[in-house]
Every structure is written in C-alpha cells, then in structure tokens.
Image (tube, rainbow, N blue to C red):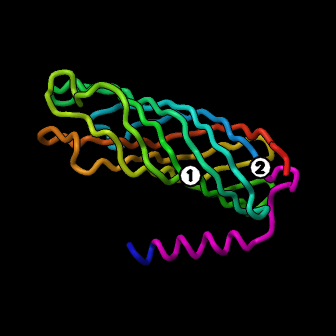
Amino acid sequence: MKQIKRTVFALLLMSGAMVSAQDSAYTNMIKIGVNGGAALPSENASANVGIDLAYQHLVTPGFGLGVATGYNQFFGKENNGLDNNDFGVVPVAALLRYYPQTIGFYLGTDLGYGFITGDDKVASNSLVERPTGGLYIKPEIGYHNINWNIALQYTKVFTSNEGNIGSQDYSVGALGLGIGYNLPLGK
C-alpha cells in the first residue's frame, strides 16, 4: 500500500511538471455535473444519482487542483428480509486532474470525507444505526474538451464495520457515468 501511495504521488508530481493541454484562458473554472450508476457491492443499495460541483485551478496546463462537493442519492433495496433505507452522501474533497492533451482523455480523483445523510437506521426494520460518514474517494477516467467532460467514475465512502447487519455489509459505493460542464473564470 505504501508503494502504491508513493507511485501515485510521483505520478502527480510528474504530471504537474508537464506542460501540455488546456488553454491558458481556462486557468480557473467551476465544474457542474450530474452522475449516476449502479451500487457496488449492492447489498444495501441498488443505484445512485447525483450532482457534482467543483472549483478547479490549472496549476500547469496539464494538471488541475481544486475542491469538490455535491450530493449523491443512493436508493435502498430489500436484501434477505431487510428493508434498507435510502441515504445520501455529501462529499467535501480535494480535486486532482491530469490532462495529457488539450482535448482527449484525462485521469482524476476526488479525495476527502463523505458525510452520509438520511434515516438514522440502516433499514426500516432494524435498530442498527447508519454510519455518519467516512473516507471518500472518486477516481475517474474520461474524455474532455474545453467545455465538457464525460467520465467513468467509481464513488466510495469507507465506513469500516459501521452499519453492518448480520451478514450484510453496509456499502456506500457505485460505478457509473458522470457528465460535467466547465464554466471558465479566466486566469
């Protein structure tokens, strides 16, 4: 795990040093988007939909840093007699993006804390308390141009063993598609 962290950090440093990609008029931007996907694993939820809001500053033309938030609604499902409740996730995260070219593929992630909202109980027919949040990560790979981004995303909030009921693990994760629009703020 330590080696993976070092490798990711080295890649981020190298990408920040590379000069490529984005138009200099788009150094600062607000990103507004929507996303949706299938819950993975799907023990307590079936799907999610959400909105994304972020601010990004291009440190170099190929590397962006910023802050991200939004809201994701997860739809609870019945599982082995448990009527799992719907819940939401509000992330507060750092945004990291790597753009190898002006238009084309990109890599990125949001990393921070995800606040879980909704009913106090995991399931309507259970007394087990819902977790309040955990480490949030949203890696993505996608296609971008100056105005639009489209990406394959994995959203995950790590809740440890909180919210587990018997053999059902409480899971906050989804694999899906996100589409975003960039509002340039200038240099």
Kindly indicate the quadrant of the structure image that contains residue 81: top left
The part of the chain drawn in magenta is: 5-27
| Closer-to-camera residue (102/23) | 23
Which mark lies nearer to you, 1 or 2? 2
**For residue 53, above or below residue 137:** above
Seen in the picture, residue 16 relative to 126 is either above or below; the reply is below
Q: Residues within 10 Å of mark 2 (few under 14, many from 20)?
A: many
Give me the disc on residue 28: 2
Tag 1 secondary structure: strand
Amino acid beneath label 1: Glu
Q: Which residue is rendered at x = 80% and y = 65% of the image?
A: 20
Q: Position of residue 160 (x, y in %)?
A: 26, 51
Q: Residue at x 80, y 60 (%)?
A: 21
Height in image: 41 above or below 51? below
Residue in the picture at 32% in, 43% down: 41
Hey, which residue is sitting farthest left in the picture? 166
In the rendered image, residue 9 lying in the magenta stretch gets the answer yes
Q: Quadrant of residue 108?
A: bottom right
Q: Looking at this view, is 89 or 106 the one in front?
A: 89
Task: Give x and y (percent) for residue 28.
Answer: 77, 49
The residue labelled by disc 1 is 140
- Asked whether 148 or 57 is in front, the reply is 57
Q: Secondary structure at mark 2?
A: strand
Q: Quadrant of the N terminus?
A: bottom left
**Residue 32 percent location from the top left of the image:** 66, 36
Q: Amino acid at mark 2?
A: Asn
The Cα atoms of the two marked residues, 1 and 2, are separated by 20 Å
Query: Does label 1 or label 2 sit earlier along the sequence?
Result: 2
Magenta segment includes 87: no
Residue 86 at x, y percent in the picture: 34, 25
Q: Main secondary structure of the magenta part?
A: helix
The part of the image, by quadrant, that contains residue 104 is bottom right
